[in-house]
Image (spheres, rainbow, N blue to C red):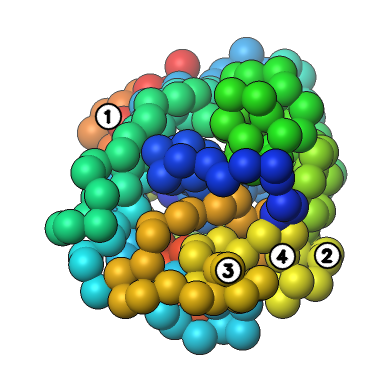
Amino acid sequence: MIVSGNISEPRNTMHRPSLLQTAAGACILCALLFLAQCLYAGNPIVQPKGKGELTIYGGSSSTTGYYDVNGVMKRFDTLATEFTATTFGMNMTYGLTDDVQLDLDVPLGYYSITSKALHPKRSIFSITYYGVGATYQLSRGKVSSSISGMVKVPPGFHHGIYDDPNHPTFLSDGYFQIGGAFNFGFNMKETWIKGHVGYNWRDEEPADEIVYGAEVGFSKVEGTGIYVKVDGVVTTADVTQPLEPFYAGTSGPPSSLERLDGGRGIFRTIDREDYTALTAGAFVGISSHVFLSGSYTLRLFGNNTLDLKGAYLGAGYKF
């Protein structure tokens, strides 16, 4: 979700899932979490009535490791196993009134896991969710603020991420989510500061989470600027006690802990996580209607989360 210069976002079963199933399921959930928190945040200023922006965005994030439940960075294994999430989609904002803005977002992703010798390449292509929301302007001026909310509907309709008959023990079709946030901003002559704090209610097994972010930007030419931002997630559950260990050997029962170097490559869903991510980005106005944006994001630290890092680009049209 890249918006007008802002690139702002386990339980036991009766039988063992295949590597393809576990890998594909983990990919979708991890990508959804990364998108929801790292790439998008509400804007403190809404679009004027009858005006809007349409942005096409894309990029890729990847990692060869993760932070375990104790926050220790680990590699997946010694066989160069790598997780990659390539994401692209469409985001639109439109002013319904001078104080109410419609927000739409539809991300798609191609997710893959590769390894030198552990297993052949596994991949899956899927819509991540259909997002529909709104932002309401609270105040304007040097200090601006708004409240925003978005409903994220998964592309599938099975309830439960561990008992899906087609993809047992992991997420296959996503989960229903409702998020809300308070957004604020301080505008100066050539600098701005803005941030948000919010809450995501998540259906099915994933635990609810608190989201936060802060951004500092600089611009000397209208429509062009650079910025640095920090985003993060804090789970409302005990991050050291996931329903299932994320990767074989990280935690859990002896069957998960007992693996040789290289492991069996079993990825499970992340139903709770903590992390803080850093983003550096820039945007440039090509004309009064067209703009380009780009950013690079990496996770600084976390618990039970992927060590994701990646670059994103967007092209938008103001109408």
Residue 216 against residue 6 in the figure, above or below = below
Whole-percent x, y for residue 62 in the image: 32, 56
Helix, strand or loop at label 1? It is loop
Q: In whole angstroms, how far apart are the C-alphas of marks 1 and 3?
A: 59 Å
* Depth check, front residue: 302 or 160: 160
Q: Residue at x 25, y 49 (%)?
A: 119
Q: Residues within 10 Å of mark 3 (few under 14, many from 20)?
A: few
Which residue corresponds to the image point at 82% horizontal and 66% vertical from the top-left?
Answer: 237
Disc 2 residue type? Thr
Q: Quadrant of residue 138?
A: top right
Q: 225 or 79, which lies in front? A: 79
Report crowding for label 1: few under 14, some 14 to 19, many 20 or more residues within 10 A (C-alpha). Answer: few
Q: Residue 36 at x, y = what percent?
A: 59, 46
Which residue is label 1 attached to? 287
Residue corresponding to mark 4:
242
Query: Which of label 2 and label 3 is nearer to you?
Result: 3
Tell me where residue 214 appears, x and y as whole percent.
60, 67
